[in-house]
Image: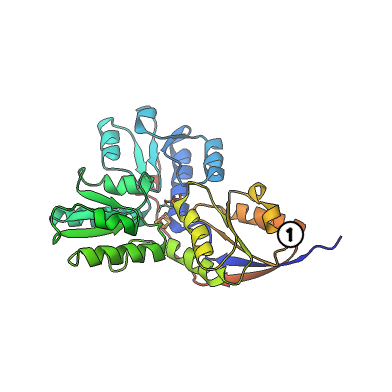
Amino acid sequence: MTKPPLTLHLAAPRGFCAGVDRAIKIVEMALKKWGAPVYVRHEIVHNKFVVDALRDQGAVFVEELDDCPDDRPVIFSAHGVPKTVPAEAARREMIYVDATCPLVSKVHIEAERHHEAGLQIIMIGHAGHPETVGTMGQLPQGEVLLVETEADVPGLQVRDETRLAFVTQTTLSVDDTKGIVAALQARFPAIIGPHKEDICYATTNRQEAVKAMAGKIDAMLVVGAPNSSNSRRLVEVAAKNGCGYAQLVQRADDIDWRALEGIRSIGITAGASAPEVLVSEVIDALKARFDVTVEVVETAQENVEFKVPRVLRVPA
Ligand code: 10D
Ligand code: SF4
């Protein structure tokens, strides 16, 4: 039987960012340096495949420091942690390595700097997400107010309208965030913030690549996990920019083939925490059912790399 033709638009950049790459390396190098088990507080990055592979090598994933013994190393996930976490690890004299992405740490420092200058902070982010919890947890309770949508802005109760700054989660929708920032600036003209926002290069580039193809494709598959903020944003970006069907898939098994019946073109991308092997798996599954022609849609080139912490670069 002949297979129907399908043009596959492959987004570039897609998949692993520099912060994810570094965080995974940190766990692998810690296992080499100290042997198993090494504890990891929270999923190192939001991807089950990555977590399972590290677990197989001897990593033990827990949600809280209380679930770690004093005498084994612990690694903090790429999303960042509230200040109380390293403080408690130090009090317990634990070996700990912070795998917080340097671009998340930069936001932590920004928030602290504004606080030291006497400003109250408004954080644009998703309630309960570990990065938001970590960034808000850099400052005492009440010093950071959370805004999730434009609709939250009118209800904000601030200490002093003239002494405010904003910071953002790194993985937000670039377009939605512009709207929230504009609403904040309209209500608080004196508010200060980063030059644009704190959304990172990887988030921005992945969203741009999706935008470049969204209007030309019948469907879009985003490889990523349901708890991955940046991956979920890619599904929304595709839908908002003209793609009639966008689905988040963890791997090929999740593809809803009935929804793809009759399509002639498809876009494929992957969140910053999704490994390329899973993208290949999805492409292979499409190739089994369609006569696929691949077209790469490249909107940016990335060459960002972050060093692992020094403790892992020196011999034990
Ligand atoms: O949920 P998320 O997009 O923040 O995290 P994920 O682990 O999926 O991707 C890496 C992004 C990080 C660590 C936050 F900057
Ligand atoms: Fe860092 Fe951006 Fe990757 Fe988050 S998505 S880990 S901020 S590079």
Three-letter code, disc 1: Lys
Residue 178 in the image: x percent, y percent? Answer: 35, 66
Horizontal placement of 231 versus 179: left or right? right
Horizontal placement of 245 versus 119: left or right? right
The answer to whether residue 302 is seen in the rendering is no
Q: Determine the residue positioned at 37% across, 33% down.
A: 64
Residue 243, located in which quarter of the rendered image?
A: bottom right
Q: Determine the residue positioned at 71% across, 58% down.
A: 286
Mark 1 Cβ inside 8 Å of ligand 1: no
Residue on which disc 1 sits: 287
Q: SS of the residue at dot 1?
A: helix
How many numbered marks does the figure carry? 1
Name the image quarter holding the N terminus: bottom right
Horizontal placement of 184 versus 262: left or right? left
Q: Determine the residue positioned at 27% across, 47% down.
A: 136
User: Foreground: 213 or 155?
Assistant: 155
Residue 78 in the image: x percent, y percent? Answer: 40, 48
